[in-house]
Amino acid sequence: MKKPSARSINQDKLTKLRDSGVDSDVLLARLDFIEYEGMRKALVKLSEADRVFPEILPTQASGRWSTKNPNLGGFKREFWKKHWHIIHPDPGEWWLEFDWSGIEARMFTAYTGDEEDVQLFKQGRDIHTFTCAKYLMAWAPDLGVNSPLDSYNLPTDWLNSKDERRTRAKNFRYGVGQYGTSAKAVLGMPGIETLGLDRQMLLQRAQQFLNARPKAQAWKEMIWAQCRTDKEARTFMGRRRKLFGLPDDRAKDGLNHKIQGSVADLMDWCLIAVSKEWPHASLILNKHDGAILAFPKECPVDTTTARVKALVEREWEVGQGIAMNFPAEWETIHG
């Protein structure tokens, strides 16, 4: 294997630095450059072809599907929106695209069953804004699931889904609540220092967040212990992943499999269900938490979309006796 030169910094190393909390404009610019350069090289190879058939392979340990030649899943969403003139349905067909909304957070809540999170999802609340207002920034520490939006005490410069503080709250929920081993996980969150909160305040608020989710903490401890001992993990649908390495590595990989592997299983189930009901449909792209499907013109758009939506967004009992549905964003594309 050829070793990288002393000056070579690959994408994995840079991503690890970013995710460990290193806040550097140069680092972020370098990651963007690597991503766009990869797209540029892929497009150069494709420029002489009249038509391209990407390869779709279920190769990852999590069960996620890989797309290569080119890696369309790695192309930014903005690219897809801008270049429909080169990525479009064939004559005589139309495409249906869906993207699950926060499916990993919903999957984790379905496994663990903490009531606050269950109710937030069932009522369609913006769980990340709620987390920001009640826990991370604590603008409204007594906030309840049924509280109206004006009781969140959001600042006047709040930018809704684009607000950086909401993004940090999303990372806070995943990094501390979903995958973190303790409240200290908050200190390694990327960009957390931009919030202007000191170390002790961050630790205190992270611990309050965890204390409000006793079922989640107990479930994580149980799964970690099982993965360390059994050296395997299964999704709620039963798919097994063998675990290797040190005990803590097995615990981490096993928990990831319970969440991410279950999302991959749901995708497989949906694609199989669609192919059975519409034998002439085809898969254009699988993006782990979404897909693009092609249907012949003979399939009515409205009724077909409604039926596929019912399959994709159906309820599942994942764990703790909790029935959770998985809503998605939808778009139809015509040639």
Image (spheres, rainbow, N blue to C red):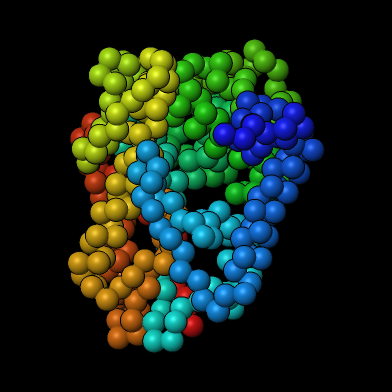
Taking the view exactly as shown, the residue that stands out farthest to the front is 1
The reply to whether residue 220 is in sight is no
Task: Give the left or right position of residue 272, taking residue 244 as reference.
Answer: left
Compared to residue 108, the image places residue 311 above or below, namely: below
Q: Residue at x 31, y 56 (%)?
A: 313
Task: Give the left or right position of residue 327, taking residue 24 as reference.
Answer: left
Marks counted in the figure total: 0
Of the 4 image quadrants, the one containing the N terminus is top right
Compared to residue 271, the image places residue 35 above or below, namely: above
| Residue 211 image position (x, y, % from top left) | 44, 18
Instruction: Indicate the quadrant where residue 15 lies.
Output: top right
Viewer-proximal residue, 306 or 224? 224
| Residue 324 image position (x, y, % from top left) | 29, 44
Q: Residue at x 34, y 76 (%)?
A: 295
Viewer-proximal residue, 104 or 285? 285
Instruction: Indicate the quadrant where residue 153 lies.
Output: top right
Viewer-proximal residue, 281 or 302? 281
Taking the view exactly as shown, the residue that stands out farthest to the right is 26
Viewer-proximal residue, 73 or 115? 73
Q: Residue at x 41, y 79 (%)?
A: 94
| Residue 257 image position (x, y, % from top left) | 35, 34
Q: Residue at x 40, y 19 (%)?
A: 245
| Residue 259 image position (x, y, % from top left) | 36, 36
The reply to whether residue 207 is in sight is yes
Task: Give the left or right position of residue 154, taking residue 87 as reference.
Answer: right
